[in-house]
Image (tube, grey):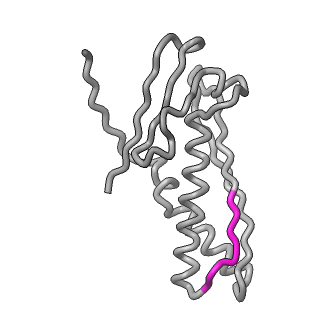
Amino acid sequence: MKRTASAHWTGDLKQGKGQLTSESNVLKNTPYSFTTRFAGEKGTNPEELIAAAHAGCFTMALSAMLGQAGFVAESLQTQAVVELDQVEGNWTVTAIDLSLTGKIPGIDNTKFQELATQAKQNCPISRLLNTKISLKAELQ
């Protein structure tokens, strides 16, 4: 299974503007820029999208693991915070902190913690951080 998204950028780093479009068109020419990434201007940025993807992926993985263990969540609420820091002069994602609140009838805390840890370790976005990245670059 493959999923696609595209980015278009014009201009320099600080004054330029970009648009993001996802295969589903949930993002369609969604603006992003230096100021939406670093200066709090309204719009999205790559780190926000990674946080959303990780929160969603982790929560779905946990739901699946709960189901396999015979539990159904009434509610799972996950917040992901992506930390972006300067490391040796380069902006680097240095951590992702997941915070989960769950309401799951019949589960004890030990089992809940076990399944949440497994979901954190095994959801595809968690594993993404250790993935092979390929690049095909073409100059026109």
Q: Quadrant of the N terminus?
A: bottom left
Taking depth in this image into account, of 117 and 88 the one nearest to the observer is 117
73 vs 99: above or below: below
Q: Position of residue 45 (x, y in %)?
A: 59, 33
88 vs 64: above or below: above
Where on the picture, by quarter, is residue 134?
Answer: top left
In the image, the segment drawn in magenta is: 71-78
Taking depth in this image into account, of 126 and 3 the one nearest to the observer is 3
Magenta segment: does it hold 72? Answer: yes
Q: Quadrant of the C terminus?
A: top left
Q: Residue at x 61, y 34 (%)?
A: 44
Residue 76 falls left or right of residue 70: right
Where on the picture, by quarter, is residue 92?
Answer: top right
Q: Position of residue 123 (x, y in %)?
A: 50, 61
Q: Position of residue 4 (x, y in %)?
A: 37, 44
55 vs 139: above or below: below
Q: Position of residue 136 (x, y in %)?
A: 27, 30
Q: Residue at x 28, y 25 (%)?
A: 137
Q: Residue at x 46, y 50 (%)?
A: 128
52 vs 76: above or below: above
